[in-house]
Amino acid sequence: MHARQARIARRPVHGVLLLDKPLGLSSNNALQKAKWLLQAEKAGHTGTLDPLATGVLPLCFGAATKFSQLQLDADKTYEAVARLGVKTSTGDAEGVVTDTRPVRVTDADLAAVTQRFTGVILQTPPMYSALKKDGRALYDYARAGLEVERAPRSVTIYELNVAQSQVSIEEFTIKIVVKCSKGTYIRTLAEDIGEALGCGAHLVALRRIATGRFDVSQCVSLSALEAMTPQQRLAVLLPVDLMLNQHAAVTLDAENTGRFLSGMRRRGHWPDADPVVVYADVPPTLLGTGHIKAGELIPGRLLSPIDIRQMAEQAMPRAADPKIEINEKVNHE
């Protein structure tokens, strides 16, 4: 008989972990690994990265999950490498080759496609994607050998740089650096650029280097997280309100704090704003989000009193309790 593994005791954890997702791991598997290492009760990610992609994957824990949509909607920046002259069934290196063509690309050609694909463009979502058609993910149809009609979607390419490099006599690649709106498929962008160059292309490497205000220099790897002590893992979490730092801030006194948290509108001399982040004044405490219209602060996503208490406890330095220091020392000797 196999010995039963001990269950991990979960605990309330609040904050944002900026993970540098490794190659070959799905976003959900990366999330579950980080959740296990932090022994967290509640967690979610902010939009998937393909297993073949690496880079910035913000993971939300506890109260931060209430605001994860903000990162789903954020602009993204990617570095990608596409091989020219070879098309595949999936648009990336995992697919089978479907077409090969000679490559004759000049710097002028690259400048032309850079201009053509900058700004608002239309993309047809790839079949190998999680978008749904009649309740089924497109990749389910693709794996069954079916192709279904997909409506083109409008996305925005804010910045685009395309540079050619020759890997060998027979292999040409381009490096693509792109800042884009949510919903942009970089595989599709690489394929469309390849078609515009007249030779076709497929994606061979993809790295997300920024999402919103977070960039890869702020990230921690799973291997680094694994090597940390439990307290060090908590220390690398970013505060929940860092996800809201682009919002205008409103601060409430004690009387209005309780009423706001109960869902009541508050009146004040505030200009109209949507959205705002709301704090209590003493002690400085995140309460949630809302919006202001005609002098009324209208509640949006609110934290619970339990969330607020747990966040305060998590922020307290554990070194203040000598028992914790002793226990951790014993456990790591």
Image (cartoon, helix red, strand yellow):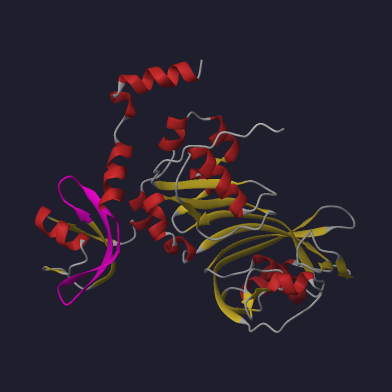
Magenta residue check for 183: no
Locate residue 102: give its quadrant: bottom right
Magenta residue check for 281: yes
Q: In this view, does 36 lie above or below 269?
A: above
* Residue 211 in view in this figure: yes
Residue 37: % across, % down: 53, 38
Residue in view at x 45 percent, y 50 percent = 42
Residue 83: % across, % down: 79, 61
- Quarter of the picture containing the N terminus is top right
Q: Give the range drawn in magenta.
A: 279-304
Residue in view at x 63 percent, y 34 percent = 4
Q: Is residue 303 above or below residue 184?
A: above
Which of the two residues, 238 or 212, is positioned nearer the viewer here?
238
Q: Is residue 153 left or right of residue 172?
A: left
Residue 111: % across, % down: 67, 70
Locate residue 264: give its quadrant: bottom left
Number of marks present in the image shown: 0
Q: In this view, does 233 lie to the left or right of 253?
A: right
Which of the two residues, 157 or 125, is positioned nearer the viewer here?
125
Dominant secondary structure of the magenta stretch?
strand
* Residue 109 in view in this figure: no
Residue 268: % across, % down: 11, 68
Which of the two residues, 27 or 115, is positioned nearer the viewer here?
27
Judged from this view, the residue extending furthest toward the front is 1
Locate residue 180: give its quadrant: bottom right
Q: In this view, does 234 lie above or below 14?
A: above
Which of the two residues, 255 or 184, is positioned nearer the viewer here?
255
Q: In this view, does 162 lie to the left or right of 295?
A: right
Q: Is residue 55 left or right of residue 267?
A: right
